[in-house]
Image (cartoon, helix red, strand yellow):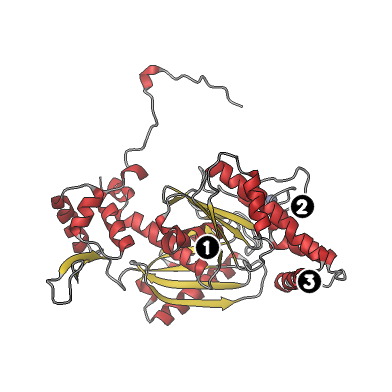
Amino acid sequence: MKRVSPIGKASIGCGPLIQPLSETSRPLRQQIFERVRAAGQMARVQLARELQISPASVTTITSELIEAGLIEEVQTLREGETARGRPAVALRVPPNRRLVVGIKLSDREHTAVLVDFAGNLIAGEAIPRSPGAMALEGILDAAERLLDRVCAKGGVSRDRVEALGLGVPGFVDCDSGVVHWSPILSSRHVPLQDALRARLGRTVFVDNDANLVTLAELWFGAGRRLSDFAVVTIEHGLGMGFVINHRIYRGARGMGMELGHTKVQLDGALCRCGQRGCLEAYVADYALVREAQTALNLPLGEMQSVGVMLESLFDHAKAGNAAARSIFRRAGRYLAVGLSNIVNLFDPALIILSGERMRYDYLYASETLSEMHAMMLDTGRDAPQIETHAWGDLLWAHGAAALALHELTEQLLGPSREMAAQ
Ligand SMILES: [Zn+2]
């Protein structure tokens, strides 16, 4: 471990060294655009009030944005007025202009949505697939086929799509677009973003699936009004996305928040990552299935699908089978450990439990929540709100589209554009 003196030389200054054009100083035109898009419609006078800038500045910047086709004027009624009143003018992001596609590739099905820059859904598509890892070429083919199908369904030419967000399960470095490991890819350290960009000839952004669900909540769901919240995804693995100050937190090297691989037991159950005692080795689907094989007396070699096994385990638990109930109960207790750790570390306003099988209420029973409360620091404050959200068909793909919307906005209006122009 490197030893450094805690006190630096006075001549080099003190205080955080903030980059000149970092997140803290987003250009005004980006702030204005994002406020208009988030509100749906907003008048210039309200923009000036909310951003605490002069009406003249708003007029200048919004004229530039209108000129660039990024926003447009729309007639609206003044508050409290009838249809006969003189219409006021508000601003909005023009619908059906600047299109992005979000694609989620997974073990069981591939999904895609086509949305415009205002966030309106134009078309969605889902293609079932048989599980298993694929070579990079197969992944590229699948993404291209989905892009073509969702564009055809939306009645638009593929050339109109400006950016594509792609989500895959596994360990993804969002900054470089390299997938270090994924259950759907047969090799490791795959530069998926560059490969897909080369194949499709357009901007591509890649992220992992837990971050996509979190982005979907942040852009389209319960997280829109919250500055700090967590999403815990429970499926084949256990994932987490975390929003801090309205932005996804990804860690210094883009790979943070691997809640599933935090250790809850020394030398404990074997995890898919090769280590022992990880939280997901007790809570994820495969952990329940591993125990179900023993509890339901399934003959060795008779491998059923994960979904069928879990359904059967759930049915046995409902019918009063003690072993089946204890499997869910134990998983729920470990989940409580994970949730209390999140609360003690981050103190979020809301934790969203998100998954396909949210109806397995044994996992989310009141016992799980009271155990979570018991493991939270006793400071007399209320526990954060916990909500369970079942996944809609296109939720992941919406998150992928949000990724594309965010990154495209940064490219068009963000600080890096200003740097490039200098
Ligand atoms: Zn692990």
Give residue 416's position: percent from left, percent from top.
Answer: 33, 48
Whether the residue under disc 1 has CB within 8 Å of ligand 1: no
Helix, strand, or loop for circle 3? helix
Which residue carries the number 1 mark? 167
Helix, strand, or loop for circle 2? loop
Vertical order, 16 against 238 (above or below): above
Give residue 8's position: percent from left, percent from top.
Answer: 44, 20
Q: Which marked residue is nearer to the observer: mark 1 or mark 2? A: 2
Dots 3, 2 in contact, CB < 8 A: no
Quadrant of the rendered image containing residue 101 = bottom left
Question: Mark 3 or 1 closer to N-term?
Answer: 1
Quadrant of the rendered image containing residue 204 = bottom left
User: Residue 359: in sight, yes or no?
Assistant: yes
Dots 1, 2 in contact, CB < 8 A: no
Tell me the number on the disc at residue 270.
Answer: 2
User: Residue 198: in sight, yes or no?
Assistant: no
Q: Which marked residue is nearer to the observer: mark 3 or mark 2? A: 3
Q: Residue at x 26, y 55 (%)?
A: 32
